[in-house]
Image (tube, rainbow, N blue to C red):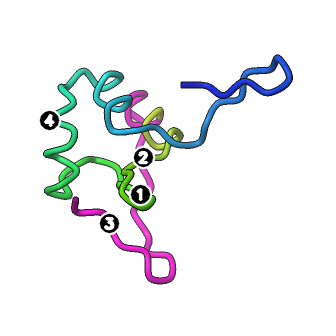
Amino acid sequence: MDVVDDGRRIERGTVTLPEFAERYGISRSAAYDLAARGALPIPVIALGKRRVLSRELMERLLAKEELPQPQMIGNARRARN
């Protein structure tokens, strides 16, 4: 979903798991299950109780581009739930 600011469309930098599921052609429950197991092909970002994914990495995955190797930043960890 895009955010509208002063009549301009601004694309968010992240997508939700249901948005990823729709774009990737899998069910919402499959996306949540893969995220819970740490089995998604791109890192899950935990924002409180919300789980989101990088829009850029999702687009690169869908374009079948090579993805960068995940790197840990500070105390960041892959979301498991």
Q: Quadrant of residue 44?
A: bottom left
- Is 78 above or below relative to 27? below
Range of magenta residues: 60-81
Q: Amino acid at mark 3?
A: Arg
Label 4, label 1: how far apart the Cα atoms are? 17 Å
Report the side of 34 relative to 24 (left or right): left
Reading the chain from its start, which is encountered first: label 3 or label 2? 2
| Residue ID at (35%, 32%) | 20
Identity, as a three-letter code, of the amino acid under mark 2: Leu
Circle 2 sits in a helix, a strand or a loop, which is it?
strand
Task: Look at mark 3 in the image and give the residue it sits on.
Answer: 78
Gap in Å between the C-alphas at discs 3 and 2?
11 Å
The picture places residue 78, in percent across and down from the top left corner, at: 32, 66
Which of the marked residues, 1 or 2, is nearer the chain's N terminus? 1
Query: Do labels 3 and 4 touch, CB within 8 Å?
Result: no
**Where is residue 74 shown, x and y percent of the image?**
50, 82
Say which element carries label 1.
Answer: strand
Query: Mark 1: which amino acid?
Result: Ile
